[in-house]
Image (cartoon, rainbow, N blue to C red):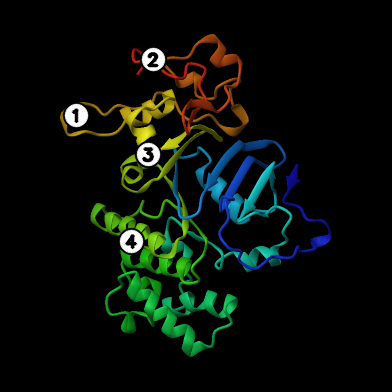
Amino acid sequence: MQTNEPEGGATADVAPKSSASAAPVLDIQGLSVTFGGALRVLDGIDLTVGAGELVCVVGESGSGKSVSALATMGLLPPHARVEAEALSFAGRPLLPLGERDLERLRGNEMAMIFQEPMTSLNPVMTIGAQIMEPLRQHRRMGAAEAREVALAMLERVQIPAPRERIDMYPHQLSGGLRQRVMIAMALVCRPALLIADEPTTALDVTIQSQILRLIDELRTEMGTSVLFITHDLAVVSEIADRIAVIYAGRIVEEGTRDQIFEDPQHPYTLALFAALPRPSDKGHALASIRGQVPAPDAMPEGCRFAPRCPFAIDKCRAERPPLAAAADGHRAACWRAPLEESVQ
């Protein structure tokens, strides 16, 4: 088993970008994260992202979505212990790498868009300087060349009047424009993998739709693989190739967008769909999932959703269900899968 604690601070060699292969761009097998030596917030996550694929990870707040992304990027705090059977990018193991080698990857071959750009952008640097930074760091561009590339990227992410705005500071831009700046920063080096952590949560519906369309256009144009983290099933329905549903630190269902939306096989997925607001619900109380996600230090035995599940049986409370095939490419961690129509 690998861990994120290289001996003696030594760094491993980072190979140059390789040509496309059959291996997934991101391969996560058995990923677990423990804080403070006792609080395990991820417990055996398996997830892959293929070349040019957009995979959505969906679940409630506190389910472990963002921790998975931060563990992949090597951005968790020192007291977090990361373990995995495999955690590799383009065939290269990530856990043995030291900070210096991770810095060579981050912003270059792997990039991340964070949820709130106002707290992620540097308030005392112009947006142009922040977009130019990865170009100068990773591509060794001079200031003039990096500025022209940054201007072209601002145009590509549809920021109006880029020659005026390139010298502005983050507080001078709207929330939607700041998020476009974050996308420009993440993609300016044309990374093979983009992780987007709830990038549309703070935006209104119109701007959210524009940002989603922009990310999808850019991933098609650049061939970038995308791991998109969200709690919003409406967002998932627009952009996902495949979906992984996460609950209390475990993947409970995985499949294509059509499989998950047309034939959900885990009671938690069913509950998420049932909680979606619909026009016919006007004047009626919205459906909700009873209870709450268990705390990391109070995880139940067996299926972690069992205390909230209306379909749970004794076996659910006693034994952990494996993530097993429900159909071709469709997997669910439920003792009752495939679910009968009477259950759905």
Helix or strand or loop: what does disc 2 sit on? loop
> Percent from the top left, x then y, of residue 280?
16, 29
Helix or strand or loop: what does disc 1 sit on? helix
Residue beneath the point at 40% across and 29% down: 269
Q: Which residue is mark 4?
A: 214
Say whether marks 1 and 4 touch (CB < 8 Å): no
Q: Which callout, 2 or 3, points at the residue further toward the start of the chain?
A: 3
Marks 4/3: CA distance? 20 Å
> Percent from the top left, x then y, of residue 230?
41, 45
Residue beneath the point at 50% across and 19% down: 306
Residue type beneath disc 1: Asp
> Does any portion of residue 266 appear in the rendered image?
yes
> Percent from the top left, x then y, of residue 253?
48, 31
Residue type beneath disc 3: Arg
Q: Which callout, 4 or 3, points at the residue further toward the start of the chain?
A: 4
Marks 1/4: CA distance? 32 Å
Residue type beneath disc 2: Glu
Q: Which callout, 1 or 2, points at the residue further toward the start of the chain?
A: 1
Q: Residue 256 vs residue 316: left or right?
A: left
Viewport quadrant of the N terminus? top right
Residue 213: name its quadrant.
Answer: bottom left
Q: Which residue is mark 1?
A: 281
Q: Residues within 10 Å of mark 1 (few under 14, many from 20)?
A: few
Residue beneath the point at 46% across and 67% down: 187
Q: Nearer the viewer, mark 1 or mark 4?
A: 4
**Above or below for 216 versus 134:** above
Q: Which residue is mark 3?
A: 257
Q: Residue 96 vs residue 200: left or right?
A: right
Q: Which residue is mark 2?
A: 340
